[in-house]
Image (cartoon, rainbow, N blue to C red):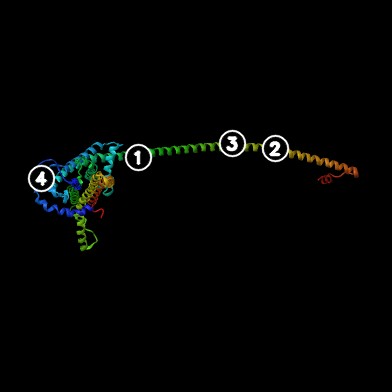
Amino acid sequence: MAEQPAIEPMHQFMVKELVHLPTFHVGGLDFNMSITNSVASMIAGAALLILFFGLTARGQIVPNRGQALAESVYNIVDRVLVTPIIGHHGRPYIPYLLGLFCTIFVLNLMGVVLVVSNLGGVTLNFTVTSQLAITATLAILTFFSVFILGFIKHGPKFLGLFWIPGMGLIGGVLMAIIEMISYFVRPLTLALRLFGNMMGGHVVLSLFGSFVVALGIVGLSGGIGTLAFVPSALSFLMIVGLTGLELVVALLQAFVFTALATVYLNEVVNFGHGH
Amino acid sequence: MAMQSEEPGAMAAPTPGEPAAPVTHEATEQAGGHESSGLPQFDFAWWPGQILWFLIIFAVVLVFMRLFAAPKVGGTIEARDGHIAGQIADARRMKDEADAKARAAAGELAEARAKSQKLASDARAKAQADVAAQLAEEEAKLAEAGAKAEARIAKARDAAMTNVQTIAADTANAIVTHLTGSKATASELAKAGN
């Protein structure tokens, strides 16, 4: 039963130091700047993005496959989100939303695709977007950038966002409180949605992976235990199916996060037009 | 979604220990022993460094998107749309020109046809007029010749009739003379002759 501790579905989320770098202290916080598996994955993801766009973003009128792919990614942000939701005034925000979408997508995707590398005993894969620290950072950064942009563009009038006209004074105040709560809960939902989706899928994948190995070992013991190969094989099939599902989730969650950011941005850019 | 319901409980476990566990790498390794009870994501020791690294890397990605990827890809798409729109506009303009030319040619053709039809009808009218004039002339000639002939015939008939009366009077005179032995008077002869 030495194999038993191997079933550690949460193990994959542990941050581990790869290259030690000094820690510095600012304002009671310890910034451990060591290159961890998390940081290495982020750097790899950013490098992949830069490599991808660097190689594929050509200015050809008739695109080749790579350029067509890059333009498809761009158009997910432009033609699917920004132009229909915000309109022409949304164009200046495309770089941020494109960066947001690509970063989340590539980090999600690395977590799914590189999951195979767990088999060699060397854990190369690490799903950065299953770290609450990262999804919360993305959510807070996006939410407060949009919120502050609202004040920069519209001044104190932007607080009118919480005022529902035609409710009377008391009803209006009550509604404003509810509106404010539902507004400021947005970064929390953004962070938890991405975090929960990415972590949940990986936990399930890891559990089924453990079943494959554990039941396979039971199957090798011979006798009646051979029957354990059946659930082991079924678990393997589950992994295949779930990996496909996780690929969809990886794209979908990146899209959902970006779509919500676009919707929030729309309230600021088209403030006073849509009400 | 099921994961989210676990979070409050999971968060409760490490939070009390977190401020007290300041946060060297060794401390987290030791804490690894009871990490199996909580989520590794709530090992707050790694948060500041991880977040700072992420902000740096995300900033690099955003600068790359702002300065290279978005303008390059978006510019290419816009240039292509412009190119296509320009070519369509060119094609439309050329089609309009061709249509105008075709209309002008059709107009010229209609004009030429009208001219030729007018020419033909003029010629026809002139020919008809000529024919009618000639016909009238000939008819006039014929009528004149007819009238002359009729006059001649009438004269001849009158002459003939006079002769016949004379002969009838002579004959009647002869008969009367023969039968009665006396000559008839000229007035009686004229009365009998009629």
Q: Which mark is residue B26?
A: 4
Q: Is residue B71 above or below residue A171?
A: above
Q: Give a yes or no on whether discs 2 and 3 share a subunit.
A: yes
x and y, in percent, of residue A10 in the image: 19, 48
Q: What's the chain of the residue with tag 3? A: B
Mark 4 belongs to which subunit? B
Q: Nearer the viewer, mark 2 or mark 1?
A: 1
Alpha carbons under labels 4 and 1: distance apart: 68 Å
**Amino acid at the residue labelled 1:** Ile
- Please state the total of marks drawn on the protein image: 4
Name the residue beneath numbered marker 1: B88
Query: In front of the other: label 2 or label 4?
Result: 4
- Whether residue A235 is visible, yes or no, is no
Element on which disc 1 rests: helix
Q: Is residue B64 above or below residue A157?
A: above
> What amino acid type should be assigned to the residue bearing mark 4?
Glu
